[in-house]
Image (spheres, rainbow, N blue to C red):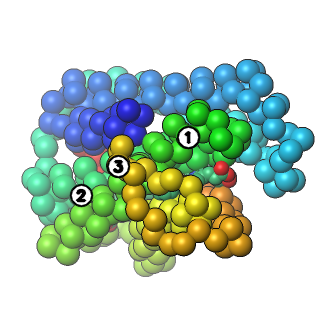
Amino acid sequence: MMAAGYLSLAVVLAVTLNHANRWLRAAGTAVVALGLAMIVLSILLADFDGTFAARTDAAAPLDRIKPFVLNAQALVAGAAVPFLLWAAWKQMRRTASAPPLRNGAARFGLLSRYAHWITATLMLCSLPMGLFLSVLPGGSPERADFLAAHQSMGLTLVIVVVLRIAVLLTTPAPGLPQALQPWERRVARTLHGLLYGLIVAFPVSGLLMSAYQGEDVWFYGWHLPQVVTPDVNRVATWAAMHGWLLPALFYAAILAHVGAVIKRHFADERFQDVRRMIT
Ligand code: HEM
Ligand code: HEM
C-alpha cells in the first residue's frame, strides 16, 4: 500500500539519519537522494506521457500553472540529488555518537529528531503528491489511489505533531544557539511556530475539503466516518486554503528554514548547529 510505503520510508530515514553507525547514516542519505531522483523522474514522465497536456483546456487560469509548479519542485529536488550524494560520502567518513532519547540543553534528543524527520519526509512528499493528484481526471482509479495515500499521510502528520508537542512538553527544546542575534532568534521562533501551524492546517483543511465534497476519506485502509455533512458550497473556501494559501505560506517558510540551515552551515561555518537535529 502506497501510504504505508511512504510512512515506512519516513521512519527508516528518521532512524538512519540519526544513527551512530556511519554506514547507516550514509545509506540513509543516499536513499533520500534516490527518493528525490524518483520524484523527479515521475514528474518528467508526467511531462511527456500526456498527463498534463490532457487537462489544460478544462483547467481554470490558476490551475494552469500547476505543471510549472511541479516542474519547479522537480528542479529543486534534482539539484539536491548531487548534494545529498556528496553528503552521503561525507557521512561515510565521519564518526559520531547517537544523542540520548530526550532533548538536552544544547541539542535535540532522538524522539524530537525522529518526529522532525518523519514530519519533513511526509510533508515534502505530500506536497507534490497533492499537486499531482489534483491534475489527474476526477473519478479515475489512479486519482483515487493517490488521494487515499495522500489523506493517510496527511492524517498521520496530525498524530506525529501531537506526539511531538507532547515530547516538547515533557522535555523542552534546547535553547537556540548562543551565537544567534536577537532578531535571528525572533525569526527562528516565529518560523518554527509557523511550520508547526502548517503541519496541522494542511491536513485539517484537506480533510474538510474532502468531507464537504462528499469524497471518501481513507486512513491506511480504514474508511473514516463523515466529519461534516457534505456541502459543495463550502468546498471552494477550503480548496483555496489547501491548494493556494497554505502552499504559498509553506514554500516561503521552508525556503527560509532550509536556507537558514544552509547559511549557518556553509557561510557561517557553524558545523555543530545542524547536528542539533541530524546526527
Ligand atoms: C528538509 C530539510 C530540513 C532541514 C535540513 C531541517 C533542519 C532543521 C534543523 C537543523 C532544526 C533545528 C533548529 C535548531 O537548532 O533549533 C530544525 C527544526 C525544526 N524544523 Fe526543520 N528541517 C528541514 C525540514 C523541515 C520541514 C519540512 C518542516 C515542517 C514541515 C520542519 C519543521 C521544523 C520545526 C517545527 C523545527 C523546530 C523544532 C522545535 O523547536 O521543536 N523542518 N529543522
Ligand atoms: C501535510 C499534509 C498535506 C499536504 C502538504 C497537502 C498538500 C496538497 C496540495 C499541495 C494539493 C494540491 C492542491 C491544488 O493545487 O489543487 C493537495 C490536494 C488535495 N488534498 Fe492535500 N495535503 C495534505 C493533506 C491532506 C489531507 C489529510 C486530505 C484529506 C483528508 C487532503 C485532501 C486533498 C484533496 C482531496 C486534494 C485534491 C484536490 C483536487 O483534486 O483538486 N490533503 N494537497
Q: Quadrant of residue 196?
A: bottom left
Give the class, few, some or many, for how many residues have Cα within 10 Å of label 2's Cα (few <14, many ≥20): many
Disc on the earlier residue, 3 or 2:
2
Q: Quadrant of residue 171?
A: bottom left
- Disc 3, disc 2: CB below 8 Å? no
Q: Quadrant of the N terminus?
A: top left
In this rendering, would 223 be left or right of 8?
right
The residues bearing labels 1 and 3 have C-alpha atoms spaced at a distance of 14 Å
- The residue singled out by tag 2 in the image is 112
Q: Quadrant of the C terminus?
A: top left
Can the viewer see residue 178? Answer: yes
Count of number-bearing discs: 3
Name the residue: 40% across, 62% down: 225
- The residue singled out by tag 3 in the image is 222
The residues bearing labels 3 and 2 have C-alpha atoms spaced at a distance of 28 Å
Which amino acid, by three-letter code, is at mark 2?
Answer: Ser
Which amino acid, by three-letter code, is at mark 3?
Answer: Trp
Q: Quadrant of residue 111?
A: bottom left
